[in-house]
């Protein structure tokens, strides 16, 4: 958060940005980049008739900029690789493994990763290639990408938008059209039952509840925790997908709250400014410093429910892997330990004893009442981890 705040600060916002290849599919030199190259060339008395050509690799080398400043070539290539790795379309990577036909992820030889820059007169932009790729490098999804099944161009709003897309969204588990609101869930004829070799895991009613909770990212954390901690649903966590949902809901940070929006409250419900439904340090920290008992009580109930699944045996007769009960106990124990880490961080930061973070946290103010709840919750979680969980021998 501190790094993002730094780059969004007024001092940084007023600075020109170069190598911002993520803003356009075609890698065109921007005005800021041309301005930068002109300044560097002028300081070294270099000819600047076509400054964007000074970034090109040619044999024999003709760019006096790259010849006089060899470190600039490295900076150019490192920033381009970084932007390429953040391309939201994972199919562009040379070692992409499709889910329908998984394969071993191969390595790329170091020398094959060298970038070669040329000028594409047709696109009026840079053409960046490497021996490791069959096509040129792009830092943004192709706006003309077609659906492999229908052959039609994918609409812009359906193109990948995040390099690591959230797995706590309804559309990750339900086919198109995308589910955005609770109404979309209600009018779906069928919802996923999360079958994974165990038969039906969730009924349609439970599935509707869970998917509906995922449509409200800002408040989904206590809703999903309460869902699995109540009505004996802890055994539903035998499903790897449901484990993934709980992990994502708890530990994905969610939407980032910009510095300028700190302390600004929505004036209407539903709000017309979704950027306000965000947090500075992630959803779990937000819940723990505002209403810690909601999270802690649900985690305690989850751990108690998981321990009740202990049959006294690690695996079933004739089995080689952990039985379902042990899998759930281990998962909930790890989850509890991670929540305890978050609580420990908030407590130590409040008292100024954290070994690394000693600066104020934007928008995080822990009252005496909240501090008491955090300390009591930490004592209860650790009492269970070092007590009942440790005595069970499954750790």
Image (spheres, rainbow, N blue to C red):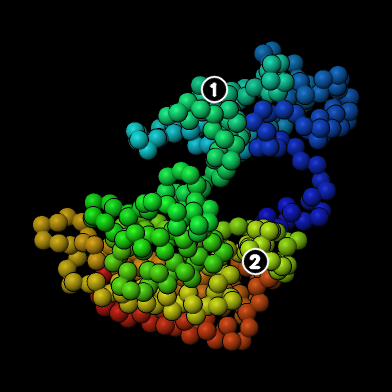
What residue is rendered at 42% in x and 75% in y?
A: 298
What residue is rendered at 55% in x and 72% in y?
A: 287
Secondary element at tag 2: loop
Q: In which quarter of the image is residue 163?
A: top right
The front one of 272 and 240 is 272
Q: Position of residue 211 (x, y in %)?
A: 44, 58
Q: Position of residue 10 (x, y in %)?
A: 81, 55
Residue 219 visible to an observer of this rendering: yes
Crowdedness of circle 2 by 10 Å Cα count: few (<14), some, many (20+)? few
Q: Quadrant of residue 64?
A: top right
Mark 1–mark 2 CB contact (< 8 Å): no
Crowdedness of circle 1 by 10 Å Cα count: few (<14), some, many (20+)? few
**Mark 2 highlights which residue?**
269
Q: Where is residue 304 in the image (x, y as percent from the top left)?
A: 32, 77
Q: In the figure, 197 relative to 89: above or below? A: below
Q: Earlier in the sequence, mark 1 or mark 2?
A: 1
């Amino acid at each position: 958060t501190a790094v993002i705040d730094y780059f969004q600060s007024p001092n940084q916002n007023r600075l020109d940005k170069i190598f911002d290849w993520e803003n356009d599919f075609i890698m065109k030199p921007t005005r800021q980049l041309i301005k930068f190259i002109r300044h560097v060339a002028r300081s070294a008395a270099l000819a600047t008739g076509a400054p964007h050509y000074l970034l090109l690799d040619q044999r024999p080398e003709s760019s006096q900029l790259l010849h006089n400043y060899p470190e600039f070539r490295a900076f150019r290539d490192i920033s381009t690789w970084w932007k390429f790795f953040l391309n939201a379309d994972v199919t562009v990577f040379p070692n992409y493994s499709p889910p329908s036909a998984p394969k071993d992820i191969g390595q790329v030889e170091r020398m094959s990763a060298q970038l070669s820059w040329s000028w594409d007169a047709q696109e009026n932009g840079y053409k960046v290639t490497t021996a490791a790729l069959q096509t040129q490098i792009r830092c943004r999804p192709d706006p003309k990408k077609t659906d492999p099944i229908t052959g039609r161009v994918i609409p812009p709003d359906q193109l990948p938008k995040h390099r690591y897309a959230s797995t706590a969204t309804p559309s990750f588990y339900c086919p198109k059209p995308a589910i955005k609101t609770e109404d979309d869930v209600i009018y779906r004829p069928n919802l996923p039952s999360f079958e994974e070799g165990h038969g039906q895991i969730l009924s349609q009613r439970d599935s509707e509840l869970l998917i509906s909770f995922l449509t409200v990212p800002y408040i989904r954390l206590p809703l999903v925790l309460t869902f699995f901690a109540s009505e004996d649903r802890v055994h539903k966590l035998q499903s790897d997908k449901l484990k993934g949902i709980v992990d994502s809901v708890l530990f994905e940070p969610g939407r980032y709250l910009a510095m300028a929006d700190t302390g600004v409250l929505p004036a209407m419900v539903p709000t017309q400014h979704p950027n306000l439904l965000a947090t500075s340090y992630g959803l779990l920290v937000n819940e723990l410093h505002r209403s810690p008992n909601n999270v802690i009580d649900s985690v305690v109930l989850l751990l108690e429910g998981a321990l009740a699944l202990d049959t006294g045996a690690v695996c079933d007769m004739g089995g080689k892997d952990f039985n379902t009960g042990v899998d759930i106990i281990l998962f909930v124990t790890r989850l509890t330990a991670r929540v305890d880490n978050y609580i420990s961080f908030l407590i130590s930061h409040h008292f100024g004893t954290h070994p690394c973070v000693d600066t104020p946290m934007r928008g995080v103010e822990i009252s005496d009442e909240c501090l008491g709840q955090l300390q009591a919750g930490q004592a209860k979680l650790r009492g269970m981890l070092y007590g009942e969980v440790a005595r069970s021998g499954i750790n």
